[in-house]
Image: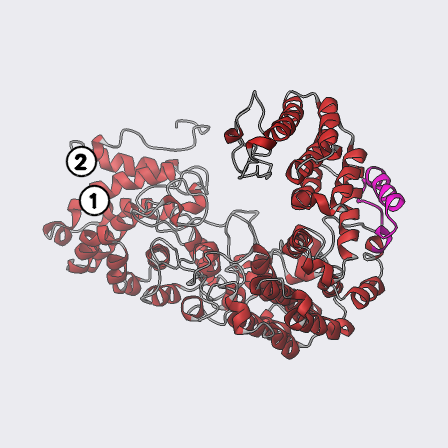
Amino acid sequence: MDPSDLDAGEEYFSPNHSFYMQNWNYTAPQFFPGSNQSGSYWQETGTYAQAANDYENGNFQQSITEFDGVVNGPGSAPDYRAAAAYSAARADFRLGNFADGATRISNILADPSLAQFWPQSWNLIDRTRAGGDIAPLAAAELLQGAALRQQPSTALCDNQPLQQLGLMAVDGMSPAQGLGFEIPEDGWGGNADLVQPGIDYAMAHDAVVNAALLMYKSVATDRKYWSQTKNPLWALSLGADGNPQDIPALNDAIANVRDNDNWSALTGRARAGVVWLLAMDEARIWLQAGQQTEALAALSIPTAMEKASFDLPDPSGNITGQVSVPPDWVVQASDMAVNGGAQALLIQAAIAADHQHSSALDQQPQWRAARQWAIEASTTLHQPVADALKPILVENMSELYQHPALRLTPNRLNGELTLTPIRSLYDNWTSTQLIEFSRAPYVAPADRQAMVGAAWIRVFALRDWHDVFAWLPDVRAAFPQLAPDTDRIAQAWLPATKRHLALLMALKVPGFVAQPSNGRGMGLPSGGTWGLNANANDVFAFDDWNPSDGNWWCPAAKNSFVLGAILSANSFGPPAPLSQIASNPGIYGYTPTGDAWDNSNVATDALLPYAPIGHLGDGGAELAAVRATGSSTQRMTEDAVAWGKNSNWLERETGGDKYLPEALHLAVRATRYACRRPADNGPRSRAAFAMLHERYPESVWAAQTPYWFGDMTQTGQ
């Protein structure tokens, strides 16, 4: 075998497989011995290659014998010994000999001469166990955590491979904030029979594993080993325990990491990481104890230089320095501090409001505390507040656009800030509120169109002709393609003609939905609006997926909820009352007896209707009034027929009737695709159809209207 084939990065070379092994990190020697030593070199390489070949061909037991020969052979090079020991452990795992493989890994980690493969050996347990909690592998992970926790900081820093393991632990590999799995009181969440043998195995093979197990049941264990070793990994465990009395120990650990010469081997970035985690733990402990001032002070523990080690993003999420992305564990710790803290306080506000039989979150001190915490913690840590929390924390809509810490994140492609995910909140606004807010320069086109369309069709439904005509400029600005229609209405001379032309425009745009959350835009991407509308990007198209509530307006269904009480009638149903959130919080991912900081799946959007912006409208009264007028299909079809019956000579002379055939055609179309309440639109559809074909049989609109529509189960339809 030619040594040049042993490329750097390959774990071994096999005659049948000359390619890189992705899961191995063995680096072949770059400088080869002289010719007088080549015999032993070639012999050793050949022995290792034979073992590798047997491994690749599935002859695992044979490869173990050969790998052991390399490990134990006299004069074997350290690189090959370390790789062979690791390969033998893998072969045992492949054979299902998990106990033997775990023992081999434990022996590797205990042998400094095999240190080159310590990190890979440490990872092997975690990677293999990820597919299932096999008892010996669980035991091996306990052994790893126990062994690492017994190391004093001097040993952890002076030994380069061991130092790397320590940093991996701080990085979250295990055991910084506890090992890679928990040990519940009831055993193993239903799998105790599978895991208990692994725990027994670990206890039988290493006495110190008891300390690791006791860590889950006794804070005293953490305190004892922190005091004995001054290893900050124990301090991190204390931080996870969350006892205020241990804050002095956390501060002591921070000072130790910063100033102790034993940590001189660590880079500034590594030191900053330990400081960061300890400071975040301290802030969490203070906040859980109700000491918000002290908690904010703890967030300021990392110095400007330590923050610079991570090149943290600014509050808008932008990163400006040389390091493109901070470590995941830094981001996670910061996110948990900012958003986990705010989230926990919001849940407390909901529980307090429920006890007071109130539905206003912003009347609770905990809501005010959550808002203050989110703003100040985000500013201090340069960690953005989660977008899902911002609508609950703002005091008014403009803050979603303009507040330094609470404004929603703009779209990275076009810079727009859309309210799409919370559009149901302004279903209960009045039409005047919708129009006034839509005029703000920062409102995105999609939101502006939904607001304007909803406001205009509402006043049309309520026959508020003053606003129907007064808001035509808003319609024209939001929907430029409707300019001919809006101009025609504005320029009409007779009031009756203005009303008829307004009817024509309304019939053209079924996407003008009285409920903004179902409104549609014009020429927008299909994902630009909320909901599952089949034609979400086309205001001129019908929503045939949700015909009754996705086009114009419709009476409330008999089994629908009360609009004024639940603020919106979106497809997801009414929001849960605060009493339900407080008394059954597990439904929303939060358990009062658990640690709210660790419940990242809390459905805080359940609190959205009870936030200040959820109370900005009229409780849905105007929308309910629109629905009370009946069916949009019925109203507009009857108005089109009445137009034909009641037209006078003056309107005909001024050209107002020229648009009647198109209105009749569109009215018939509406009976097919729009409101299905009541189910039978037949009489009105038939009346519009008959008038169109009797009066304008040769028109293009009659040609486009070959049918009328009704309930086919009824006689004569």
Residue on which the image places disc 2:
696
Specify start and end residues of the magenta stretch as a single range. Answer: 186-211
Q: Is residue 219 magenta?
A: no
- Where is residue 339? Give x, y as percent: 58, 63
* Residue 203 lies within the magenta run: yes
Amino acid type at image mark 2: Tyr
* In contact (CB < 8 Å): disc 2 and disc 1: yes
User: Which residue in the rendered view is the most extreme toward the left?
Assistant: 653
Q: Choose between 17 and 4: the one closer to the eye.
A: 4
Find disc 1 in the rendering and name its residue.
Answer: 660
Structure colour scheme:
secondary structure
538 versus 420 height, above or below: above
Q: Which mark is residue 456?
A: none
Q: How far is the residue under mark 2 from the one under mark 1?
A: 10 Å
Frontmost residue, 601 versus 104: 104
Q: Nearer the viewer, residue 683 or 669?
A: 669
